[in-house]
Image: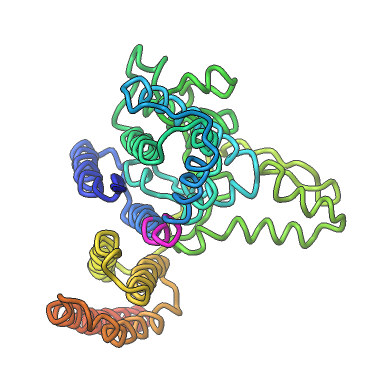
Amino acid sequence: MKVDYIALSVPVFFLLIGVELGYSFYKKLGYYRLNDSIANLSQGIGQQVTGLFMKTALFFGYKYIFEHWRLFDLPNTIWVWIILFIGVDFFYYWFHRMSHQVNALWAAHIVHHQSEEYNLTVALRQSWFQGWFSWVFYLPLALIGFDPLMFLTLSAFNTLYQFWIHTRAIKNMGFLEHIINTPSHHRVHHGSNPKYIDKNHAGSLIIWDKMFGTFQREEEEVYYGITKPLASWNPVWANVHYWAELIDTARKTDEFADKIRVFIKPPGWFPLALGGFKPAPEIDVLHYKKYDAYYSKALVGYVLFQFVVALAVGSMLLFLYPKMTGETVVIAAVFTLFTLLSCGALLEGKAWLKYFEFIRLIVSLLGLYLFKDMAIFNTLAIVFTLVQAGSFTWFCFIQNKIIHAKETSTI
């Protein structure tokens, strides 16, 4: 039986985020911003929801090679588990390293690096599409003969390990810095400083970076994010913006071979006709400023409430989808993603959001009809109707308040 250890760990993730948030608030460290944290968590929820549509297919690929082409029948012993742990970590290193050195792969992985903050919510900021190709890097393990369920278990724990290293609260860890991936090593990895870019790709063990020449010690202050800031809280745009840039570059390129190279060369590569390679710029410390779009303070409570609704529906989907029909899975997934999109647009003060939000709230109620065959339909219908009706009323009140505030300011 497959166990989704990532989904089961979500409550622990939020508990630890709460602890770090409390520590940051108590010490006045400023590790968290509401808009950035909502954007990070939205990516994590979206990644889990979109992943539902590919999990079975990806598992089948590994399982097929194991069942038909494996070279050895390996026993289920502690030594095989240890070897597989090392193997998973080794292939993770190469997947991660290639995700920074091939534009087409970076287009997915870039999502994880977009935040200009560094806290535990960043660990959950994951690409919606990265999982569609990352599994290919692990296929040698299936060929050798490592059991698919063993692989899934250790792959999940490799991912879970990396949650805690996304923090500024833990400094140097002494001799452990020579062996394992630590918060200090991973802060370097998330840096946009030129000396930190494409360094420390490790999952659990930092030894791979030291062996293959990609290790960098944390020295000067780290500036987080990507070299060309995303400057948006839109979770959909975050997942496609670099693809749009690559396609635009390929379109401007005359040579067909260069159009292909745009997607397989490292980030920063451009054909000579477009200026050639553009290295990462040095950080302009004097003028450095994080993206922080204006939004009405009246919206804060509403955004938080809608985020909780998206989290609740997304969590329900993760645990109940095997018992749901294809229609209801799609409807719940679309509702969750549109709610997250709405939260991002509200925090950016987008003008179109007003109409989008009213339509989203009304249409979501109509979608309830498709859930009529579920055993909990009556309870679900009552709760969801109250939530959406309350949201509609609340949003109308906020809009009137914002309009009144604007009219008062012009008098």
Look at the picture and state if 255 lies above or below 5: below
Would residue 209 appear left or right of 115 to someone viewing this image? right
Would residue 62 appear left or right of 75 to someone viewing this image? right
Percent across and percent down for residue 76 are 33, 28
Q: Quadrant of residue 148?
A: top left
Look at the picture and state if 229 lies above or below 22: below
Judged from this view, the residue extending furthest toward the top is 175
Q: Is residue 192 visible?
A: no
Q: Residue at x 51, y 30 (%)?
A: 144
Which secondary structure class fits the magenta region best? Answer: helix
Would residue 129 appear left or right of 15 to someone viewing this image? right
Percent across and percent down for residue 260 are 77, 52
What span is in magenta?
Answer: 48-55
Q: Is residue 328 visible?
A: yes
Percent across and percent down for residue 219 are 47, 22
Q: Residue at x 30, y 88 (%)?
A: 366
Percent across and percent down for residue 280 are 64, 39
Q: Residue at x 12, y 78 (%)?
A: 379
Q: Residue at x 45, y 58 (%)?
A: 54
Would residue 140 appear left or right of 173 to someone viewing this image? right
Q: Quadrant of residue 268?
A: top right
Look at the picture and state if 189 lies above or below 376: above
- Asked whether residue 96 is drawn in magenta, I would say no
